[in-house]
Amino acid sequence: MAHFTSLDELSTKEIERLIERGLQLKQGAPVQPIPTKTVANLFFEHSTRTKCSFDMAEHHLGLHVLPFETATSSVQKGETLLDTCKTLQAIGVDALVIRHGETGYYEQLQHHLSIPIINAGDGSGQHPTQSLLDLMTMYEVYGNVIDKIVVICGDLRHSRVARSNAHVLQRLGATVIGSGPREWFDETMGIEYREIDEAFASSDIIMLLRVQHERHLADQDFRATDYHLHYGLTRKRMEQLRPSAIILHPAPINRGVEIAEELVEHPQSRIFEQMTNGVFARMAILERAFNQQTTKETI
Amino acid sequence: MAHFTSLDELSTKEIERLIERGLQLKQGAPVQPIPTKTVANLFFEHSTRTKCSFDMAEHHLGLHVLPFETATSSVQKGETLLDTCKTLQAIGVDALVIRHGETGYYEQLQHHLSIPIINAGDGSGQHPTQSLLDLMTMYEVYGNVIDKIVVICGDLRHSRVARSNAHVLQRLGATVIGSGPREWFDETMGIEYREIDEAFASSDIIMLLRVQHERHLADQDFRATDYHLHYGLTRKRMEQLRPSAIILHPAPINRGVEIAEELVEHPQSRIFEQMTNGVFARMAILERAFNQQTTKETI
Amino acid sequence: MAHFTSLDELSTKEIERLIERGLQLKQGAPVQPIPTKTVANLFFEHSTRTKCSFDMAEHHLGLHVLPFETATSSVQKGETLLDTCKTLQAIGVDALVIRHGETGYYEQLQHHLSIPIINAGDGSGQHPTQSLLDLMTMYEVYGNVIDKIVVICGDLRHSRVARSNAHVLQRLGATVIGSGPREWFDETMGIEYREIDEAFASSDIIMLLRVQHERHLADQDFRATDYHLHYGLTRKRMEQLRPSAIILHPAPINRGVEIAEELVEHPQSRIFEQMTNGVFARMAILERAFNQQTTKETI
């Protein structure tokens, strides 16, 4: 069963094959439509990018998408996630894309289903489709990430994006550095902490993390302008970046907090390119779920 | 106008034709697509199974499904159900699938519309598409229900499933018995009450009803474990069932309340099969609404 | 870029071309499908008619509609409208239909996007697709509106329908009159106020505006029956109308308030016809957004 729950479950060879397939799809590689299959997207947490990106990827693959709204489903009557998934399986759904607030929600679930689960984010755990699109964006620029220096800056402790990325980037040969507020750094992630100005100036890839409204911005003691000054990508820090360095952000962006308003669309920013790439990364993941023949392994 | 609001409106011959058509569709009978027609699914109450099942049935028939979310519709501005339906008719919708909290909501409505209504559940009234899939599941096993003993167990008083089923089963030749808490039994349904152990041991078909969270499980005096012990399908009661007896439940299931966790997928359980059958039952109903030629009457 | 934000931006020639195209589509003019394009409908305010009408128009044009629910989007995480729109553009959406509570929301937005925006209503500003379908309904009856007398009756001050219509009707040659409660009249709209009985009796077109629940009907001092008596289309006023006069209402209707229950489907009422026309008006607008060749200009 080709579940896609965490990049840890995939070999580096398989990860690089997916990246390559995503880049080929972006360049117009032909798609073999899968019109006889149905997918349901179960988003139990807010999403624009990931949800819409999957919808678009499914459309490009000719898949049927079963409408599913968590707010009006029987989840509201207390139905468990397992029974909801088994129900969808019983009525003929062939794959499930799931975002859920519970970290590792898929661990038990995957053993009780005969259809693949694609993890679109689990609590503070993993966000492997975001990682794949991030990697695709880096490979698009650099070919690979061997010996590249990647700084991840912000609330590493609560970020599923950071966690997914830190590990896979190291497996693929990159050097990963953490930065931002010391108290938000996560010692358990197995990466080095560096002070922001030094970290930014020496990196090839700057990954800014979102300051989460629900955690920090509502906090009266938290000042967005202070954060920007101390831990954001200011115009001044921009000038210190390597000219070849690229800027990533998983979005939604807090303009003027993690990044200065006018830098969001700077030529070195790949923020909107990441979103474009997300569609193709997810097409590659969906093809895998349906065992479509994709590219030959050339890596 | 081929409304589908209550099985009481259909002859037994027509009911059995729909059951047969559903079973044929399940076995792969060819479908004549209806791509020029548009359906809207109006669900004013929570649903996973019924809503998704209709969506899937409509997909298999090649119908266009107009997205309609009650939460963001003008119903929120106080528009009546009639005006909402007339609006959809005016913009070109060809059939309406409606679940609504008001018992008998369709009675006035159907006289003001020129497009068919399919009742997907009305208050504590009817749930005829559920009845049809229940019947289909019984016919699949037994061929028909003549002289079969069916026990309906649980909150009969508030169950639209019970009400729909009790009547039609008797019309089709079955003996229907009520069981579960005495105070939840409904004398007006014209069926006999029997104590649970006796009822279960002598039945061919066990229909468990859902204990409604919103009515009972939130009640501090209500104890799920007590209910299970006194009125649920325990492992012990399972052992007393006839080996040929089948277990049905309209779902969502409260595992460990109406039925022991480990019995949900017991070989005698048809609970997930019911969901699968629901898609085909609804295809047969939709074909009827659009006057598609279906199977020849062979009953 | 073929934005469609306000009829003020279009020449009268272009407006009449759209009306004509809408009427041709209604009569069955062939459509050139646009299946390679994707549209997203962003409704930040409640809607049945406009939202469903766009969905149906998009279906008829063979467009792919990307599902987008504001309630579960990242808008809930504080994402700006601009970033939401840029995200959708980045993932491959080709046009945006937007209803938003902020008057003139599109003014800045349109300069930052490379895909067309279709305004489906902005705060108390414009509702140009409604205006177009209103015009289409008038042209269908009268051929044009030159020298026709149009009375707009109700809460002109808070109505985006009134504002859009008053201006364009005058540009197209009609005489526009305001009526209803004096205190709800808007002096800045450049139209004359007339007392209701006189206004109704002398008009060719009666446009009733909706009394907004959220503003008035919840007000304890506001009495629906008083409003009906003083400012509604009663049976008595109906008898005074010109036999050729037609009645319009943007809906949802408060039956018994703006119009007597039994007059909603009076032969002179075009209220449901407006909804039917809305689909074709929006098809014409979407064709324009995608630069489809439509009718030759024959006006």
Image (cartoon, coloured by chain):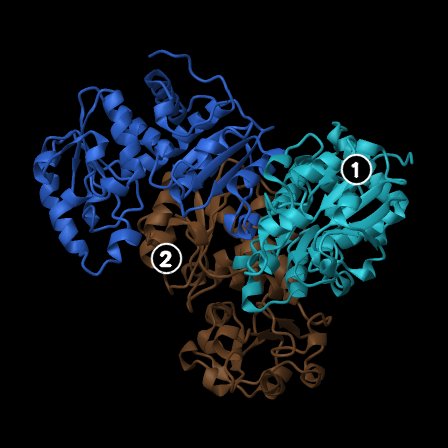
Chain colours: A blue, B cyan, C brown
Q: Nearer the viewer, residue C230 or B101?
A: B101
At label 2, the amino acid type is Tyr
* Element type where label 2 sits in the image: helix
Residue receiving disc 1: B138
Measuring 31% from the left and 35% from the top, which residue is drawn there? A274
* Element type where label 1 sits in the image: helix
Q: Chain of mark 1?
A: B
Residue B94 in the image: x percent, y percent?
Answer: 70, 50
Residue receiving disc 2: C106
Dots 1, 2 in contact, CB < 8 A: no
* Position of B138 relative to C253 (above/below): above
Q: Nearer the viewer, residue B63 or C37?
A: B63
Residue B170 in the image: x percent, y percent?
Answer: 87, 48
Q: Quadrant of residue C245?
A: bottom right
Q: Nearer the viewer, mark 1 or mark 2?
A: 1
Residue C233 in the image: x percent, y percent?
Answer: 64, 80
